[in-house]
Image (cartoon, rainbow, N blue to C red):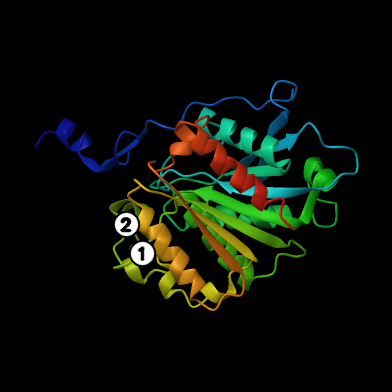
Amino acid sequence: MDSSSITDEVSYEFLPYFRAFKDGRVERFFGTDVVPPSSDSQSDGVASKDVVILPETGVSARLFMPSTINSGQKLPLLVYFHGGAFCFGSPFCPTYHNYLTSLVAEANVLAVSVDYRLAPEHPLPIAYEDSWGALQWVASHCGGQGPEAWLNDYANVRRVFLAGDSAGANIAHNIAVRAGVEDLAGVKLCGVCLVHPDFASRDGYVTKTWLFACPGTTGSEDPRINPAVDPNLPRLGCTKVVVCVAEKDGLRERGWFYYETLRKSGWGGVVEIIETQGEEHVFHLFNPTCEKAVTLLKRLASLMNEG
């Protein structure tokens, strides 16, 4: 075998989004295009900016703030984790920038969209650690003395919500579990929304993508992918969870299994499940103006404005 054929040998691919080669090269076909943040909120009612939130690792985030906010007003804060099989995606690409802009405008909240590091260059659990670090960064603003003025001035850290889609929903769940176990210095996590979440199946099957992104996993015995084996599930650190599934999504049954598992776990909160008929995985990101995507957006917005 010549050297060129070795170089081109694929170790894993998730087409049409991602390909990794055995020589360490990675090709990403989604999430690599960048739309700049918008300091002018006149066109869509939302301003955005990028900040480094973990200087020691360079992890950053895109922040979103509605233009309707008034001086001294405190709004709920959403921390969002993008999807992409733990291997691709970005808060800075048009798909996620536009979605968070629409969600912030609809819900009238602040948002932190986290740019956690991606596998395989940064295998799991690095994405979990980055995401937990992002929530700790949020917590650093509890006394109004944090590094980011938008959060100091406008964020109600007693009304924090987590959300994510696909792998990002998995991250949001795991961060919520950790928030129920560890102290967050004044942050009150009120709710979590998991859109088309990526978990183990009812029979314990885990996807090849998970095994690729988390080479140290124990598979179906790993509580990060299989909440049914997590002794800390009853300590989930919020009072409301909304699980969203889609009828034609290959992960649909996993979302239902998660919902049933959480409902029976002894956790003291309220869990709700919403199924969108006739749609596939993360349809709302790729067809955001369709009626069902707008309905889903409004449901997420209402979660952050209840109570």
In the picture of the structure, the residue carrying the numbered disc 2 is 211
Indicate the quadrant containing the C terminus: top left, top right, bottom left or bottom right: bottom right
Q: In the image, residue 105 lies at what x, y percent? A: 69, 35
Q: Which mark is residue 217?
A: 1
In this image, 248 relative to 196: left or right?
left
Extreme residue in the left direction: 1
Residue 237 lies, with reference to residue 284, above or below; the image says: below
The residue carrying pointer 2 sits among few (fewer than 14), some (14 to 19) or many (20 or more) residues within 10 Å by Cα, namely: some
Q: Position of residue 289 (x, y in %)?
A: 53, 29
* Position of 253 relative to 65 (above/below): below
Would you say 166 lies left or right of 208 here? right
Residue 54 visible (yes or no): no
How crowded pointer 1 is (Cα within 10 Å; few <14, some 14-19, many 20+) is rated as some
Disc with the residue nearer the chain's start (1 vs 2): 2
| Amino acid at the residue labelled 1 | Thr
Q: Mark 1–mark 2 contact, CB under 8 Å?
A: yes
In this rendering, the answer to whether 211 lies above or below 153 is below
Which secondary structure lies at badge 1? Answer: loop
Q: Quadrant of residue 52?
A: top right
Furthest-right residue in view?
72
